[in-house]
Image (spheres, helix red, strand yellow):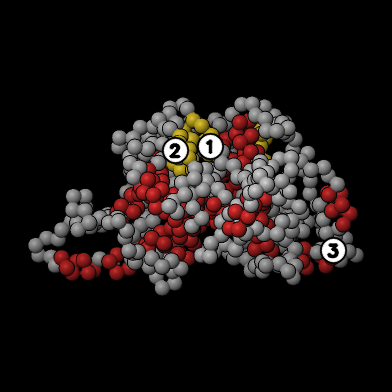
Amino acid sequence: MGDTTLGSRVFALSDLHVDYKENRKLLDGWPDKKYSNGVLVVAGDVTDNMTLLETTLKGLQLKFRQVFFVPGNHELWMRSDDKSTESIGKFHAILALCARLGVGTSLTRVPLSAGDHVWLVPLFSWYATPEEDPDNSFYVRPSAVCRQRDIWMDNHMCVWPTPTDGQTRADYFADLNRSVTERLRYYYHASGLNWTMGDTTLGSRVFALSDLHVDYKENRKLLDGWPERRNHELWMRSDDKSTDSIGKFHAILALCARLGVGTSLTRVPLSAGDHVWLVPLFSWYATPEEDPDNSFYVRPSAVCRQRDIWMDNHMCVWPTPTDGQTRADYFADLNRSVTERLRYYYHASGLNWTMGDTTLGSRVFALSDLHVDYKENRKLLDGWPEKKYSNDVLVVAGDVTDNMTLLETTLKGLQLKFRQVFFVPGNHELWMRSDDKSTDSIGKFHAILALCARLGVGTSPTRVPLSAGDHVWLVPLFSWYATPEEDPDNSFYVRPSAGEDEARQRDIWMDNHMCVWPTPTDGQTRADYFADLNRSVTERSYDAPVSWLNPTVHVFGHQHRN
Protein backbone atom coordinates (compact mmCIF):
# COMPACT_ATOMS: atom_id res chain seq x y z
CA MET A 1 0.00 0.00 0.00
CA GLY A 2 2.24 2.80 -1.24
CA ASP A 3 5.70 2.32 0.27
CA THR A 4 4.44 0.40 3.31
CA THR A 5 5.52 -3.23 3.68
CA LEU A 6 4.36 -5.60 6.36
CA GLY A 7 7.04 -6.15 8.97
CA SER A 8 5.69 -4.41 12.02
CA ARG A 9 7.27 -3.47 15.31
CA VAL A 10 5.39 -3.17 18.57
CA PHE A 11 6.12 -0.13 20.73
CA ALA A 12 4.87 0.38 24.30
CA LEU A 13 4.86 3.46 26.48
CA SER A 14 2.85 5.08 29.25
CA ASP A 15 2.46 8.31 31.23
CA LEU A 16 2.16 10.60 28.22
CA HIS A 17 0.45 13.21 30.45
CA VAL A 18 -0.62 15.41 27.55
CA ASP A 19 -2.15 17.92 29.97
CA TYR A 20 1.36 19.40 29.81
CA LYS A 21 1.86 21.27 26.54
CA GLU A 22 5.53 20.16 26.37
CA ASN A 23 4.37 16.54 26.12
CA ARG A 24 1.76 17.37 23.51
CA LYS A 25 4.40 19.15 21.47
CA LEU A 26 6.64 16.08 21.69
CA LEU A 27 3.88 13.79 20.37
CA ASP A 28 2.91 16.22 17.62
CA GLY A 29 6.53 16.23 16.48
CA TRP A 30 6.66 12.49 15.83
CA PRO A 31 6.97 11.87 12.07
CA ASP A 32 3.77 10.80 10.30
CA LYS A 33 5.27 8.01 8.19
CA LYS A 34 8.13 6.58 10.27
CA TYR A 35 5.89 4.36 12.42
CA SER A 36 3.02 3.91 9.96
CA ASN A 37 3.52 0.14 9.94
CA GLY A 38 4.09 -0.14 13.68
CA VAL A 39 1.76 -0.98 16.57
CA LEU A 40 1.62 1.18 19.69
CA VAL A 41 0.53 0.07 23.16
CA VAL A 42 -0.29 2.98 25.49
CA ALA A 43 -0.32 1.61 29.03
CA GLY A 44 -2.25 4.37 30.77
CA ASP A 45 -1.99 7.90 32.16
CA VAL A 46 -2.58 10.03 29.09
CA THR A 47 -5.03 12.56 30.60
CA ASP A 48 -8.15 12.86 32.76
CA ASN A 49 -9.75 15.07 30.08
CA MET A 50 -12.02 12.99 27.82
CA THR A 51 -11.86 15.45 24.92
CA LEU A 52 -8.07 15.65 25.05
CA LEU A 53 -7.87 11.84 25.37
CA GLU A 54 -9.89 11.43 22.17
CA THR A 55 -7.74 13.99 20.33
CA THR A 56 -4.54 12.28 21.47
CA LEU A 57 -5.65 8.78 20.51
CA LYS A 58 -6.79 10.03 17.08
CA GLY A 59 -3.42 11.69 16.59
CA LEU A 60 -1.58 8.47 17.47
CA GLN A 61 -3.77 6.54 15.03
CA LEU A 62 -2.53 8.79 12.24
CA LYS A 63 1.06 7.81 13.04
CA PHE A 64 0.71 4.07 13.83
CA ARG A 65 -0.98 1.20 12.02
CA GLN A 66 -2.78 0.12 15.18
CA VAL A 67 -3.11 1.62 18.66
CA PHE A 68 -4.00 -0.15 21.92
CA PHE A 69 -4.88 1.54 25.20
CA VAL A 70 -5.42 0.56 28.84
CA PRO A 71 -6.67 3.33 31.17
CA GLY A 72 -4.38 4.32 34.06
CA ASN A 73 -5.23 5.89 37.40
CA HIS A 74 -5.17 9.44 35.98
CA GLU A 75 -7.89 8.58 33.43
CA LEU A 76 -10.22 7.74 36.34
CA TRP A 77 -9.82 11.11 38.02
CA MET A 78 -13.17 12.91 37.92
CA ARG A 79 -13.62 16.39 36.45
CA SER A 80 -16.51 18.83 36.65
CA ASP A 81 -17.20 18.38 32.90
CA ASP A 82 -17.35 14.56 33.01
CA LYS A 83 -20.64 13.01 31.95
CA SER A 84 -19.99 10.00 34.18
CA THR A 85 -20.85 10.34 37.86
CA GLU A 86 -18.03 8.17 39.24
CA SER A 87 -14.74 6.54 38.23
CA ILE A 88 -16.13 3.12 37.29
CA GLY A 89 -18.57 4.80 34.91
CA LYS A 90 -15.77 6.91 33.46
CA PHE A 91 -13.65 3.79 32.93
CA HIS A 92 -16.42 2.21 30.83
CA ALA A 93 -16.97 5.49 28.98
CA ILE A 94 -13.28 5.37 28.01
CA LEU A 95 -13.68 1.81 26.71
CA ALA A 96 -16.70 2.97 24.68
CA LEU A 97 -14.65 5.86 23.27
CA CYS A 98 -11.90 3.44 22.25
CA ALA A 99 -14.44 1.14 20.58
CA ARG A 100 -15.81 4.08 18.60
CA LEU A 101 -12.31 5.15 17.49
CA GLY A 102 -11.09 1.63 16.70
CA VAL A 103 -8.45 1.75 19.47
CA GLY A 104 -7.82 -1.76 20.81
CA THR A 105 -8.72 -2.58 24.41
CA SER A 106 -9.25 -6.32 24.05
CA LEU A 107 -7.36 -9.46 23.11
CA THR A 108 -6.08 -9.14 19.53
CA ARG A 109 -3.88 -11.22 17.23
CA VAL A 110 -1.48 -8.82 15.54
CA PRO A 111 0.46 -9.93 12.41
CA LEU A 112 4.08 -8.75 12.29
CA SER A 113 5.78 -10.25 9.26
CA ALA A 114 4.90 -13.11 6.93
CA GLY A 115 3.92 -16.09 9.09
CA ASP A 116 4.68 -14.30 12.37
CA HIS A 117 2.37 -12.64 14.88
CA VAL A 118 1.95 -11.67 18.51
CA TRP A 119 -1.06 -11.66 20.80
CA LEU A 120 -1.67 -8.32 22.55
CA VAL A 121 -3.70 -8.90 25.70
CA PRO A 122 -4.78 -5.69 27.49
CA LEU A 123 -5.56 -6.40 31.15
CA PHE A 124 -7.23 -4.00 33.60
CA SER A 125 -6.21 -3.49 37.22
CA TRP A 126 -6.29 -1.27 40.28
CA TYR A 127 -4.11 -1.48 43.35
CA ALA A 128 -5.26 -2.87 46.69
CA THR A 129 -4.66 -0.87 49.86
CA PRO A 130 -3.10 -2.56 52.91
CA GLU A 131 -6.49 -2.39 54.63
CA GLU A 132 -8.20 -4.18 51.72
CA ASP A 133 -5.58 -6.88 51.13
CA PRO A 134 -2.56 -6.71 53.46
CA ASP A 135 -0.92 -9.76 51.89
CA ASN A 136 -1.09 -8.64 48.25
CA SER A 137 -0.83 -4.86 48.43
CA PHE A 138 2.18 -3.25 46.78
CA TYR A 139 1.69 -0.20 49.00
CA VAL A 140 4.90 0.87 50.78
CA ARG A 141 4.36 2.20 54.27
CA PRO A 142 5.54 5.84 54.58
CA SER A 143 8.11 7.04 57.06
CA ALA A 144 6.95 8.64 60.30
CA VAL A 145 7.24 12.19 59.01
CA CYS A 146 5.40 11.68 55.70
CA ARG A 147 1.73 12.64 55.25
CA GLN A 148 1.62 10.34 52.21
CA ARG A 149 -2.05 9.36 52.27
CA ASP A 150 -3.18 12.98 52.22
CA ILE A 151 -1.11 13.95 49.19
CA TRP A 152 -1.96 10.83 47.17
CA MET A 153 -4.21 12.41 44.53
CA ASP A 154 -6.27 9.29 43.76
CA ASN A 155 -7.81 9.71 47.22
CA HIS A 156 -9.10 13.14 46.22
CA MET A 157 -9.74 12.84 42.48
CA CYS A 158 -11.38 9.42 42.12
CA VAL A 159 -15.03 8.89 43.03
CA TRP A 160 -16.02 5.28 43.70
CA PRO A 161 -19.48 3.71 43.91
CA THR A 162 -20.41 1.86 47.08
CA PRO A 163 -18.88 -1.65 46.87
CA THR A 164 -21.15 -4.70 46.99
CA ASP A 165 -20.46 -8.05 48.66
CA GLY A 166 -17.12 -6.86 50.02
CA GLN A 167 -15.67 -6.55 46.50
CA THR A 168 -12.58 -4.32 46.44
CA ARG A 169 -11.60 -2.10 43.51
CA ALA A 170 -8.78 -4.52 42.75
CA ASP A 171 -11.33 -7.38 42.62
CA TYR A 172 -13.62 -5.42 40.28
CA PHE A 173 -10.96 -4.77 37.65
CA ALA A 174 -9.47 -8.26 37.98
CA ASP A 175 -12.91 -9.74 37.29
CA LEU A 176 -13.08 -7.78 34.02
CA ASN A 177 -10.12 -9.80 32.76
CA ARG A 178 -11.79 -13.16 33.26
CA SER A 179 -13.39 -13.31 29.79
CA VAL A 180 -10.08 -12.18 28.27
CA THR A 181 -8.02 -14.94 29.84
CA GLU A 182 -10.71 -17.51 29.04
CA ARG A 183 -10.78 -16.37 25.42
CA LEU A 184 -6.98 -16.55 25.16
CA ARG A 185 -7.11 -20.04 26.58
CA TYR A 186 -9.68 -20.90 23.89
CA TYR A 187 -7.41 -19.65 21.11
CA TYR A 188 -4.37 -21.46 22.45
CA HIS A 189 -6.34 -24.66 22.62
CA ALA A 190 -7.86 -24.19 19.16
CA SER A 191 -4.33 -23.80 17.80
CA GLY A 192 -3.13 -27.00 19.49
CA LEU A 193 -0.87 -25.08 21.90
CA ASN A 194 -0.34 -25.63 25.60
CA TRP A 195 -2.05 -23.23 27.99
CA THR A 196 -2.19 -22.83 31.75
CA MET A 197 -3.72 -19.96 33.68
CA GLY A 198 -3.35 -20.36 37.42
CA ASP A 199 -4.82 -23.71 38.42
CA THR A 200 -7.21 -23.88 35.46
CA THR A 201 -6.79 -26.79 33.08
CA LEU A 202 -8.61 -27.30 29.83
CA GLY A 203 -10.67 -30.46 29.61
CA SER A 204 -14.29 -29.40 29.62
CA ARG A 205 -17.55 -31.27 29.75
CA VAL A 206 -20.83 -30.05 28.29
CA PHE A 207 -23.93 -30.19 30.48
CA ALA A 208 -27.50 -29.55 29.36
CA LEU A 209 -30.65 -28.97 31.37
CA SER A 210 -33.91 -27.07 31.23
CA ASP A 211 -36.96 -26.17 33.36
CA LEU A 212 -34.98 -24.73 36.27
CA HIS A 213 -38.10 -22.80 37.42
CA VAL A 214 -36.23 -20.74 39.99
CA ASP A 215 -39.52 -19.06 41.00
CA TYR A 216 -39.67 -21.96 43.48
CA LYS A 217 -37.28 -21.49 46.40
CA GLU A 218 -36.44 -25.21 46.52
CA ASN A 219 -35.04 -24.98 42.98
CA ARG A 220 -33.09 -21.83 43.79
CA LYS A 221 -31.63 -23.58 46.83
CA LEU A 222 -30.59 -26.51 44.66
CA LEU A 223 -28.78 -24.22 42.18
CA ASP A 224 -27.14 -22.20 44.95
CA GLY A 225 -25.72 -25.44 46.30
CA TRP A 226 -23.80 -26.22 43.12
CA PRO A 227 -20.05 -25.62 43.56
CA GLU A 228 -18.77 -22.56 41.73
CA ARG A 229 -16.45 -22.83 38.74
CA ARG A 230 -16.78 -26.56 38.33
CA ASN A 231 -41.44 -21.20 27.53
CA HIS A 232 -41.61 -19.59 30.95
CA GLU A 233 -39.24 -16.75 30.05
CA LEU A 234 -41.85 -15.39 27.62
CA TRP A 235 -44.60 -15.10 30.22
CA MET A 236 -45.35 -11.41 30.74
CA ARG A 237 -45.25 -9.72 34.15
CA SER A 238 -46.55 -6.34 35.28
CA ASP A 239 -42.98 -5.11 35.83
CA ASP A 240 -41.73 -6.11 32.35
CA LYS A 241 -40.41 -3.26 30.22
CA SER A 242 -41.34 -5.11 27.03
CA THR A 243 -44.91 -4.83 25.77
CA ASP A 244 -45.27 -8.35 24.36
CA SER A 245 -43.57 -11.76 24.44
CA ILE A 246 -41.59 -11.22 21.22
CA GLY A 247 -40.12 -8.03 22.68
CA LYS A 248 -39.33 -9.85 25.93
CA PHE A 249 -37.59 -12.63 23.99
CA HIS A 250 -35.26 -10.09 22.34
CA ALA A 251 -34.73 -8.33 25.67
CA ILE A 252 -33.55 -11.68 27.08
CA LEU A 253 -31.11 -12.08 24.17
CA ALA A 254 -29.81 -8.56 24.86
CA LEU A 255 -29.38 -9.44 28.55
CA CYS A 256 -27.43 -12.57 27.61
CA ALA A 257 -25.20 -10.58 25.27
CA ARG A 258 -24.45 -8.11 28.09
CA LEU A 259 -23.63 -10.92 30.53
CA GLY A 260 -21.60 -12.93 28.02
CA VAL A 261 -24.07 -15.84 28.10
CA GLY A 262 -24.00 -17.64 24.77
CA THR A 263 -27.12 -17.62 22.59
CA SER A 264 -25.48 -18.12 19.19
CA LEU A 265 -23.41 -20.66 17.29
CA THR A 266 -20.13 -21.23 19.19
CA ARG A 267 -17.16 -23.56 18.80
CA VAL A 268 -16.32 -24.90 22.29
CA PRO A 269 -12.95 -26.60 22.94
CA LEU A 270 -13.11 -29.62 25.25
CA SER A 271 -9.68 -31.20 25.51
CA ALA A 272 -6.53 -30.92 23.41
CA GLY A 273 -7.48 -31.32 19.75
CA ASP A 274 -11.17 -31.90 20.47
CA HIS A 275 -14.16 -29.56 20.34
CA VAL A 276 -17.91 -29.40 19.87
CA TRP A 277 -20.17 -26.88 18.17
CA LEU A 278 -23.02 -25.63 20.35
CA VAL A 279 -25.87 -24.42 18.17
CA PRO A 280 -28.73 -22.76 20.09
CA LEU A 281 -31.93 -22.83 18.02
CA PHE A 282 -35.14 -20.98 18.87
CA SER A 283 -38.63 -22.41 18.51
CA TRP A 284 -42.28 -22.18 19.53
CA TYR A 285 -44.93 -24.81 19.07
CA ALA A 286 -47.63 -24.65 16.40
CA THR A 287 -51.25 -25.17 17.37
CA PRO A 288 -53.40 -27.63 15.40
CA GLU A 289 -55.30 -24.66 13.94
CA GLU A 290 -52.07 -23.05 12.70
CA ASP A 291 -50.43 -26.18 11.29
CA PRO A 292 -52.49 -29.39 11.70
CA ASP A 293 -49.86 -31.54 9.96
CA ASN A 294 -46.83 -30.47 12.03
CA SER A 295 -48.29 -29.67 15.44
CA PHE A 296 -47.11 -31.79 18.36
CA TYR A 297 -50.25 -30.86 20.24
CA VAL A 298 -52.07 -33.89 21.68
CA ARG A 299 -55.85 -33.62 21.58
CA PRO A 300 -57.32 -33.81 25.10
CA SER A 301 -59.96 -36.26 26.15
CA ALA A 302 -63.58 -35.15 26.19
CA VAL A 303 -63.61 -34.32 29.90
CA CYS A 304 -60.39 -32.26 29.97
CA ARG A 305 -60.48 -28.43 29.84
CA GLN A 306 -56.84 -28.49 28.69
CA ARG A 307 -56.82 -25.30 26.63
CA ASP A 308 -58.06 -23.20 29.53
CA ILE A 309 -55.44 -24.43 32.02
CA TRP A 310 -52.52 -24.11 29.55
CA MET A 311 -50.82 -21.10 31.11
CA ASP A 312 -49.12 -19.88 27.92
CA ASN A 313 -52.59 -18.89 26.71
CA HIS A 314 -52.94 -16.54 29.68
CA MET A 315 -49.39 -15.37 30.40
CA CYS A 316 -47.98 -14.72 26.91
CA VAL A 317 -48.88 -11.58 24.98
CA TRP A 318 -48.32 -11.77 21.23
CA PRO A 319 -48.19 -8.96 18.68
CA THR A 320 -50.56 -9.11 15.73
CA PRO A 321 -49.05 -11.48 13.12
CA THR A 322 -48.25 -10.19 9.64
CA ASP A 323 -48.59 -12.04 6.32
CA GLY A 324 -50.07 -15.09 8.03
CA GLN A 325 -46.80 -15.81 9.85
CA THR A 326 -47.31 -18.10 12.85
CA ARG A 327 -45.28 -17.93 16.06
CA ALA A 328 -43.56 -21.15 15.03
CA ASP A 329 -42.62 -19.51 11.71
CA TYR A 330 -41.24 -16.43 13.47
CA PHE A 331 -38.86 -18.34 15.74
CA ALA A 332 -37.86 -20.75 12.98
CA ASP A 333 -36.90 -17.78 10.78
CA LEU A 334 -34.55 -16.55 13.51
CA ASN A 335 -32.49 -19.71 13.06
CA ARG A 336 -31.79 -19.08 9.39
CA SER A 337 -28.64 -17.03 9.99
CA VAL A 338 -27.47 -19.67 12.50
CA THR A 339 -27.79 -22.56 10.05
CA GLU A 340 -26.23 -20.46 7.28
CA ARG A 341 -23.30 -19.60 9.53
CA LEU A 342 -22.84 -23.26 10.47
CA ARG A 343 -22.85 -24.10 6.79
CA TYR A 344 -20.15 -21.45 6.32
CA TYR A 345 -17.95 -23.05 9.00
CA TYR A 346 -18.44 -26.53 7.58
CA HIS A 347 -17.42 -25.27 4.18
CA ALA A 348 -14.44 -23.30 5.51
CA SER A 349 -13.23 -26.52 7.17
CA GLY A 350 -13.51 -28.50 3.92
CA LEU A 351 -16.40 -30.60 5.26
CA ASN A 352 -19.55 -31.60 3.45
CA TRP A 353 -22.74 -29.79 4.39
CA THR A 354 -26.32 -29.88 3.22
CA MET A 355 -29.26 -28.05 4.74
CA GLY A 356 -32.49 -28.97 3.06
CA ASP A 357 -32.07 -28.56 -0.72
CA THR A 358 -29.38 -25.87 -0.40
CA THR A 359 -25.91 -26.65 -1.73
CA LEU A 360 -22.86 -24.51 -1.21
CA GLY A 361 -21.57 -22.82 -4.36
CA SER A 362 -22.19 -19.14 -3.93
CA ARG A 363 -22.20 -16.30 -6.40
CA VAL A 364 -21.51 -12.64 -5.64
CA PHE A 365 -23.89 -10.07 -7.13
CA ALA A 366 -23.33 -6.32 -7.11
CA LEU A 367 -25.69 -3.47 -7.87
CA SER A 368 -26.33 0.13 -6.88
CA ASP A 369 -28.90 2.93 -7.20
CA LEU A 370 -31.89 0.92 -5.99
CA HIS A 371 -33.69 4.21 -5.14
CA VAL A 372 -36.50 2.54 -3.26
CA ASP A 373 -38.12 5.94 -2.64
CA TYR A 374 -39.85 5.11 -5.95
CA LYS A 375 -42.57 2.51 -5.45
CA GLU A 376 -41.80 0.89 -8.82
CA ASN A 377 -38.31 0.03 -7.56
CA ARG A 378 -39.65 -1.30 -4.27
CA LYS A 379 -42.10 -3.47 -6.19
CA LEU A 380 -39.23 -4.84 -8.29
CA LEU A 381 -37.21 -5.81 -5.20
CA ASP A 382 -40.24 -7.32 -3.45
CA GLY A 383 -40.81 -9.46 -6.53
CA TRP A 384 -37.40 -11.15 -6.35
CA PRO A 385 -37.86 -14.83 -5.44
CA GLU A 386 -37.17 -15.79 -1.81
CA LYS A 387 -35.12 -18.93 -2.49
CA LYS A 388 -33.35 -18.32 -5.82
CA TYR A 389 -30.46 -16.32 -4.30
CA SER A 390 -30.52 -17.78 -0.79
CA ASN A 391 -26.98 -19.13 -1.19
CA ASP A 392 -25.55 -15.98 -2.79
CA VAL A 393 -23.94 -12.75 -1.61
CA LEU A 394 -25.13 -9.27 -2.55
CA VAL A 395 -23.04 -6.08 -2.61
CA VAL A 396 -25.14 -2.89 -2.65
CA ALA A 397 -22.86 -0.05 -3.71
CA GLY A 398 -24.92 2.91 -2.54
CA ASP A 399 -27.97 5.03 -3.26
CA VAL A 400 -30.81 3.04 -1.76
CA THR A 401 -32.66 5.89 0.00
CA ASP A 402 -32.15 8.92 2.26
CA ASN A 403 -34.91 7.63 4.57
CA MET A 404 -33.36 5.71 7.49
CA THR A 405 -36.53 3.72 8.21
CA LEU A 406 -36.92 2.69 4.57
CA LEU A 407 -33.20 1.85 4.38
CA GLU A 408 -33.56 -0.52 7.33
CA THR A 409 -36.65 -2.15 5.81
CA THR A 410 -34.91 -2.61 2.44
CA LEU A 411 -31.74 -4.11 3.91
CA LYS A 412 -33.79 -6.50 6.04
CA GLY A 413 -35.74 -7.54 2.95
CA LEU A 414 -32.55 -8.22 1.00
CA GLN A 415 -31.21 -10.28 3.91
CA LEU A 416 -34.24 -12.56 3.56
CA LYS A 417 -33.31 -13.24 -0.08
CA PHE A 418 -29.48 -13.45 0.10
CA ARG A 419 -27.10 -15.38 2.34
CA GLN A 420 -25.09 -12.26 3.08
CA VAL A 421 -25.54 -8.58 2.24
CA PHE A 422 -22.86 -5.84 2.09
CA PHE A 423 -23.52 -2.13 1.84
CA VAL A 424 -21.56 1.07 1.19
CA PRO A 425 -23.50 4.36 1.56
CA GLY A 426 -23.83 6.53 -1.55
CA ASN A 427 -24.40 10.25 -1.87
CA HIS A 428 -28.20 9.94 -1.53
CA GLU A 429 -27.87 8.25 1.87
CA LEU A 430 -26.11 11.37 3.15
CA TRP A 431 -28.92 13.72 2.17
CA MET A 432 -30.43 15.21 5.33
CA ARG A 433 -34.15 14.98 6.14
CA SER A 434 -36.24 16.79 8.76
CA ASP A 435 -36.77 13.51 10.65
CA ASP A 436 -33.06 12.58 10.83
CA LYS A 437 -31.62 12.25 14.32
CA SER A 438 -28.15 13.18 13.06
CA THR A 439 -27.27 16.86 12.72
CA ASP A 440 -25.05 16.60 9.64
CA SER A 441 -24.13 14.21 6.82
CA ILE A 442 -21.01 12.85 8.55
CA GLY A 443 -23.11 11.94 11.59
CA LYS A 444 -25.72 10.31 9.35
CA PHE A 445 -23.01 8.28 7.59
CA HIS A 446 -21.88 6.83 10.93
CA ALA A 447 -25.50 6.24 11.97
CA ILE A 448 -25.90 4.15 8.80
CA LEU A 449 -22.81 2.09 9.68
CA ALA A 450 -24.28 1.55 13.16
CA LEU A 451 -27.57 0.42 11.60
CA CYS A 452 -25.72 -2.06 9.38
CA ALA A 453 -23.80 -3.39 12.37
CA ARG A 454 -27.07 -3.94 14.23
CA LEU A 455 -28.63 -5.77 11.26
CA GLY A 456 -25.55 -7.83 10.42
CA VAL A 457 -25.08 -6.13 7.04
CA GLY A 458 -21.40 -6.11 6.12
CA THR A 459 -19.51 -2.81 5.86
CA SER A 460 -15.99 -4.05 6.60
CA PRO A 461 -13.54 -6.52 4.96
CA THR A 462 -14.88 -10.07 5.08
CA ARG A 463 -13.65 -13.42 3.80
CA VAL A 464 -16.58 -14.98 1.92
CA PRO A 465 -16.50 -18.70 0.99
CA LEU A 466 -17.88 -19.55 -2.44
CA SER A 467 -17.38 -23.24 -3.16
CA ALA A 468 -15.20 -25.93 -1.60
CA GLY A 469 -11.70 -24.52 -1.14
CA ASP A 470 -12.52 -21.22 -2.85
CA HIS A 471 -13.29 -17.79 -1.41
CA VAL A 472 -13.15 -14.06 -2.09
CA TRP A 473 -12.38 -11.07 0.10
CA LEU A 474 -15.01 -8.35 -0.03
CA VAL A 475 -13.45 -5.03 1.02
CA PRO A 476 -15.94 -2.13 1.27
CA LEU A 477 -14.23 1.26 0.85
CA PHE A 478 -15.77 4.68 1.52
CA SER A 479 -15.34 7.76 -0.65
CA TRP A 480 -16.65 11.19 -1.63
CA TYR A 481 -15.78 13.19 -4.72
CA ALA A 482 -13.44 16.19 -4.77
CA THR A 483 -14.51 19.37 -6.53
CA PRO A 484 -12.12 21.10 -8.95
CA GLU A 485 -11.65 23.85 -6.36
CA GLU A 486 -10.64 21.34 -3.70
CA ASP A 487 -8.35 19.18 -5.82
CA PRO A 488 -7.99 20.27 -9.47
CA ASP A 489 -5.59 17.42 -10.30
CA ASN A 490 -7.67 14.54 -8.93
CA SER A 491 -11.26 15.67 -9.43
CA PHE A 492 -13.41 13.58 -11.77
CA TYR A 493 -15.68 16.57 -12.31
CA VAL A 494 -16.41 17.16 -15.99
CA ARG A 495 -16.61 20.82 -16.94
CA PRO A 496 -19.81 21.75 -18.83
CA SER A 497 -19.55 22.44 -22.52
CA ALA A 498 -19.46 25.99 -23.83
CA GLY A 499 -23.20 26.06 -24.37
CA GLU A 500 -24.05 24.99 -20.82
CA ASP A 501 -24.55 27.29 -17.84
CA GLU A 502 -22.03 26.12 -15.23
CA ALA A 503 -23.62 28.14 -12.43
CA ARG A 504 -27.03 26.61 -13.14
CA GLN A 505 -25.51 23.16 -13.31
CA ARG A 506 -24.04 23.62 -9.85
CA ASP A 507 -27.41 24.86 -8.62
CA ILE A 508 -29.32 21.78 -9.78
CA TRP A 509 -26.75 19.38 -8.29
CA MET A 510 -28.81 18.21 -5.30
CA ASP A 511 -25.86 17.31 -3.07
CA ASN A 512 -25.22 21.04 -2.76
CA HIS A 513 -28.68 21.48 -1.22
CA MET A 514 -29.39 18.21 0.58
CA CYS A 515 -26.08 17.47 2.32
CA VAL A 516 -25.08 19.31 5.49
CA TRP A 517 -21.37 19.25 6.29
CA PRO A 518 -19.57 20.11 9.52
CA THR A 519 -16.89 22.79 9.38
CA PRO A 520 -13.69 21.15 8.05
CA THR A 521 -10.55 21.20 10.20
CA ASP A 522 -6.94 21.59 9.04
CA GLY A 523 -7.98 22.05 5.41
CA GLN A 524 -9.31 18.48 5.21
CA THR A 525 -11.67 18.01 2.26
CA ARG A 526 -14.66 15.65 2.28
CA ALA A 527 -12.74 13.36 -0.05
CA ASP A 528 -9.87 13.31 2.47
CA TYR A 529 -12.22 12.48 5.35
CA PHE A 530 -13.72 9.41 3.70
CA ALA A 531 -10.37 8.27 2.28
CA ASP A 532 -8.91 8.39 5.81
CA LEU A 533 -11.65 6.01 7.02
CA ASN A 534 -10.19 3.36 4.71
CA ARG A 535 -6.72 3.53 6.20
CA SER A 536 -7.36 0.98 8.93
CA VAL A 537 -8.98 -1.30 6.34
CA THR A 538 -6.10 -1.26 3.90
CA GLU A 539 -3.47 -1.44 6.65
CA ARG A 540 -5.10 -4.30 8.53
CA SER A 541 -4.21 -7.96 7.86
CA TYR A 542 -6.95 -10.58 7.72
CA ASP A 543 -6.87 -14.22 6.65
CA ALA A 544 -3.14 -14.10 5.89
CA PRO A 545 -0.67 -11.23 6.19
CA VAL A 546 -1.30 -8.81 3.34
CA SER A 547 0.05 -5.32 2.93
CA TRP A 548 -1.70 -4.16 -0.20
CA LEU A 549 -4.94 -4.64 -2.08
CA ASN A 550 -4.79 -5.97 -5.60
CA PRO A 551 -8.48 -6.51 -6.44
CA THR A 552 -9.64 -8.84 -9.17
CA VAL A 553 -12.88 -6.86 -9.46
CA HIS A 554 -13.57 -3.28 -8.43
CA VAL A 555 -17.28 -2.69 -7.91
CA PHE A 556 -17.95 1.00 -8.45
CA GLY A 557 -21.41 2.29 -7.64
CA HIS A 558 -21.78 5.43 -9.71
CA GLN A 559 -19.97 8.67 -10.41
CA HIS A 560 -22.55 10.89 -12.16
CA ARG A 561 -20.51 13.69 -13.70
CA ASN A 562 -18.47 14.30 -10.56
User: Label for residue 39?
Assistant: 2
Give above or below for 406 relative to 272.
below
Cβ atoms at labels 1 and 2 below 8 Å apart: yes
Residue in the image at 41% along x and 73% along y: 434
Q: Say which label, 1 or 3, has the lower sequence index.
A: 1
Question: Would residue 52 be seen by someone viewing this image from the given angle?
Answer: yes
Disc ID at residue 474: none
Q: Secondary structure at mark 2?
A: strand
Determine which of the numbered discs, if any, sits on residue 306 in the image. Answer: 3
Three-letter amino acid code at the position of disc 3: Gln
Of labels 2 and 3, earlier in sequence is 2
Viewer-side label of 1, 3: 1
Mark 2–mark 3 distance (CA, rounded to whole Å): 66 Å
Q: Which residue is mark 1?
A: 120
Measured as percent of width and height from the top left, residue 239 is found at 73, 69
Q: Secondary structure at mark 3?
A: helix
Q: Is residue 519 above or below residue 268?
A: below
Amino acid type at mark 1: Leu
* Separation of marks 1 and 2 at Cα, in angstroms: 10 Å
Badge 1 or badge 2: first in the primary sequence: 2
Residue drawn 65% across the image and 38% down it: 182
Q: Residue furthest right?
A: 303
Choose top left, top right, bottom left or bottom right for residue 198: top right
- Comparing 314 with 195, the one in front is 195
Foreground: disc 2 or disc 3: 2
Q: Residue at x 19, y 56 (%)?
A: 484
Residue at 39% x, 32% y is 6
- The answer to the question of whether label 2 and label 3 lie on touching residues, with beta carbons closer than 8 A, is no
**Picture coordinates of residue 109 (x, y %)?**
52, 36
Q: How many discs mark residues in the rendered view?
A: 3
Q: Left or right: 530 with respect to 360?
A: left
Looking at the image, which residue sits at the far left?
Answer: 498
